[in-house]
């Protein structure tokens, strides 16, 4: 990390409502957790009297099975963002440039700048079309699937084509799959390309954002760099044990995907009576409020006990809000708060 860049960096706004009396639709996390999670966590507390096993064999095995890769390719990290930072620390040097999509997760550009590198913004729809010659100017390219905040997932063949061009250009491709678990789409972890890193988060799909569990997937020399550079004891015992348990709950994942898809379709139909709503593959919907005041929409919802995300903080969006997809009862409260009766 570049010390000079740290001194000029700023924090990035995110969703998340600290007031427990407010129904939080600003953060895209599952309102449910798998059965047995609380028991696993309690049992892990006693084991936390010793340092974790820094090899994390059970966690690696569960993660590898979940995304379809070799357990040796899994790098345990405290959340998906930690996997993103670790990758950038290993790949970027001061003076480098990196391609990032917009509108998308604001932490990409911030993390790039913290390394003393420069983000080059390309619209998320155009990033997949960048050719080999152009990619050769960048040390790193970032894609997000499904993209946050639009919710659009990337076709696997198109993603593999980008990975191939990045390989020819000697550019590392970082694929952020924080929300891919909400879909049936396969992971880019199956590419097994030495220029590709996949970042995964457990916090959204399994409803454990405060536990901080995730992992990176990489192979070859890059995998070795990430493994060497990751912090010792990079996961606490509760996170490792709960994470391994959650990753093996296939029934919970299937049920979550079905419920999210059903509720997302229902919410989109209702929200479309007032707003322009972007089609989504993710557990959230991006809404263009048009000529209405974004602040007014946010305040109306909050007055009715609901927090939604101000999406104007995303580059390229100036009249948008983002809402999470939760359970039916909560979703009905959101729709009523926004004047879109279900």
Image (tube, grey):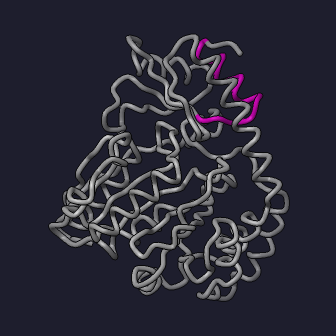
Q: Where is 208 relative to 152, above or below? A: below
Magenta part of the chain? 324-339
Q: Where is 58 relative to 10, above or below? A: below
- The spot of residue 300 in percent (x, y) is 53, 17
Viewer-proximal residue among 158 and 66: 158
Viewer-proximal residue among 195 and 285: 195
User: What residue appears at the point 47 percent right and 44 percent down from the top-left corner?
Assistant: 147
Viewer-proximal residue among 39 and 191: 191
- The spot of residue 284 in percent (x, y) is 58, 36
- The spot of residue 319 in percent (x, y) is 38, 22
Main SS class of the magenta portion in the image: helix
**Which quarter of the image is occupied by the C terminus?**
top right
Q: Where is 2 relative to 153, above or below? A: below
In the image, 304: left or right of 130? right
- The spot of residue 328 in percent (x, y) is 76, 29
User: What residue appears at the point 50 percent right and 85 percent down from the top-left corner?
Assistant: 232
């Amino acid at each position: 990390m570049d010390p000079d860049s740290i001194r000029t960096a700023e924090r990035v706004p995110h969703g998340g409502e600290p007031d427990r009396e407010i129904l939080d639709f600003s953060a895209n996390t599952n309102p449910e957790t798998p059965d047995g999670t609380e028991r696993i966590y309690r049992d892990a507390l006693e084991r936390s009297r010793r340092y974790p096993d820094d090899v994390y064999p059970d966690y690696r095995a569960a993660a590898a099975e979940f995304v379809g890769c070799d357990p040796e390719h899994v790098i345990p990290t405290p959340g998906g963002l930690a996997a993103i930072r670790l990758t950038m620390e290993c790949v970027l040097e001061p003076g480098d440039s990196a391609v990032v999509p917009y509108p998308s997760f604001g932490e990409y550009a911030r993390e790039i700048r913290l390394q003393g590198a420069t983000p080059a913004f390309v619209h998320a729809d155009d990033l997949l079309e960048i050719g080999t010659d152009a990619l050769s100017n960048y040390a790193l390219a970032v894609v997000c699937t499904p993209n946050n905040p639009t919710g659009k997932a990337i076709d696997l063949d198109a993603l593999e084509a980008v990975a191939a061009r990045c390989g020819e250009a000697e550019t590392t491709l970082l694929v952020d799959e924080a929300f891919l678990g909400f879909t049936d789409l396969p992971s880019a972890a199956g590419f097994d390309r030495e220029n590709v890193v996949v970042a995964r988060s457990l916090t959204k799909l399994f409803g454990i954002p405060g536990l901080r569990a995730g992992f990176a997937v990489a192979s070859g020399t890059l995998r070795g760099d990430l493994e060497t550079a990751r912090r010792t004891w990079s996961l606490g015992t509760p996170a490792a044990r709960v994470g391994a348990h959650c990753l093996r709950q296939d029934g919970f994942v299937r049920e979550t995907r079905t419920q999210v898809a059903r509720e997302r379709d229902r919410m989109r139909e209702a929200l479309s009576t007032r707003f322009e709503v972007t089609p989504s593959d993710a557990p959230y919907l991006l809404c263009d409020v048009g000529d209405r005041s974004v602040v007014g929409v946010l305040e109306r919802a909050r007055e009715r006990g609901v927090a939604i995300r101000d999406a104007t903080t995303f580059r390229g969006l100036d009249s948008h809000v983002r809402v999470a997809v939760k359970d039916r009862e909560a979703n009905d409260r959101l729709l009523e708060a926004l004047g879109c009766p279900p």
